[in-house]
Amino acid sequence: MRNGSALRGGRLWPVHLVLAIGAAAMVMPFFWQVLTSLKTFTEATRTPPVWIPSFEWGNFAKVLDETPFLQQLGNTVVMTTGRTLAQLLFCSLAAYAFARLRFPGRDVIFVALLSVLMVPGQLFLIPQYQIIQSLGWLNTLPGLIAPGMFSAFGTFMMRQFFMTLPAEVEEAARLDGANPLRIFWSVMLPLARPGLLALGVLTVLWSWNDLMWPLIVNTDPESMPLSAGLSALQGEHMTDYPVLMAGSLMASAPIIVLFIIMQKQLIQGIAFTGSK
């Protein structure tokens, strides 16, 4: 038994080595961001690079002085929460209809929905901006939230998850007299909790880091989220990189903590979604 374990361990070490190198490559940019946020401007621009910073903690205070950081943090939280809750509701409703209900043109509509995934998102910017402008939602939170309330990817992901659920549970509820909406809300949706958690985490990550749309729809720094507001720290002729990295670190800290807490549920939800 010990020889077998040792043999398997000897075969797996190249895999572990490759994974370790890949993990180091992914962590290195974040590690360099932390180091740069604690440097002076001279240290950040010195060649060769300075690896041990002088721990300039004042860079974090400069972020609060040069940007309305707390206001933009609140805007980001509201925008992310609104988009996430809306996607969980609308995508799960559409996904349940595509996975479980029978209606004319269902497959054609689903294929048309999937085709949206192959269209670059930049093509939707002008019509979305015109709609938001006509509604008078420029420089407002509804203007930030509305375009992200539904996604073809979220619908596809939840549909795949609903298709993995046993049909017997749905049939039993139908025999008890439950209508499709009741079956969805009371039976299928609780069973789809891992998929909802995975979609929720992915939506939070995407919404928190969304940059292009907030830059287009907002010009007032007070109404911007952090992703767009921190761009003000990047100057036209010179950028204070330590302050910029400090602001980026402060903006990414909440989402990193959330991902660490929810990583198990995220992996479980994606695994269940792909098991069909």
Image (cartoon, rainbow, N blue to C red):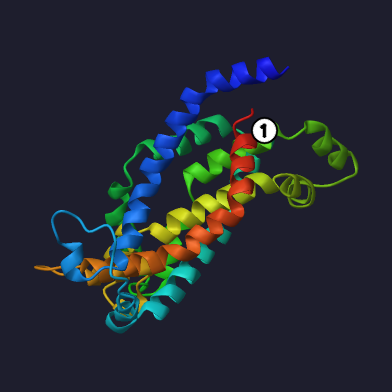
Local SS, label 1? helix
Q: Is residue 45 above or below residue 29?
A: below
Q: Nearer the viewer, residue 111 or 10?
A: 10
Inspect the image, locate mark 1, and give the three-letter code of the amino acid beneath it.
Answer: Met
Q: Nearer the viewer, residue 23 or 119?
A: 23
Q: Is residue 215 above or below residue 94?
A: below
Q: Position of residue 200 (x, y in %)?
A: 57, 53
User: Is 187 situated left or right of 218 in this image?
Assistant: right
Camera sees residue 87: no
Q: Position of residue 5 (x, y in %)?
A: 66, 20
Q: Nearer the viewer, residue 60 or 191?
A: 60
Q: Identify which residue is drawn at 45% across, 36% down.
A: 20
Q: Identify which residue is drawn at 40% across, 35% down.
A: 21
Q: Nearer the viewer, residue 258 or 205?
A: 258
Camera sees residue 116: yes
The residue to which callout 1 is attached is 163
Q: Identify which residue is drawn at 54% across, 22% down.
A: 12
User: Is 273 situated left or right of 149 in this image?
Assistant: right
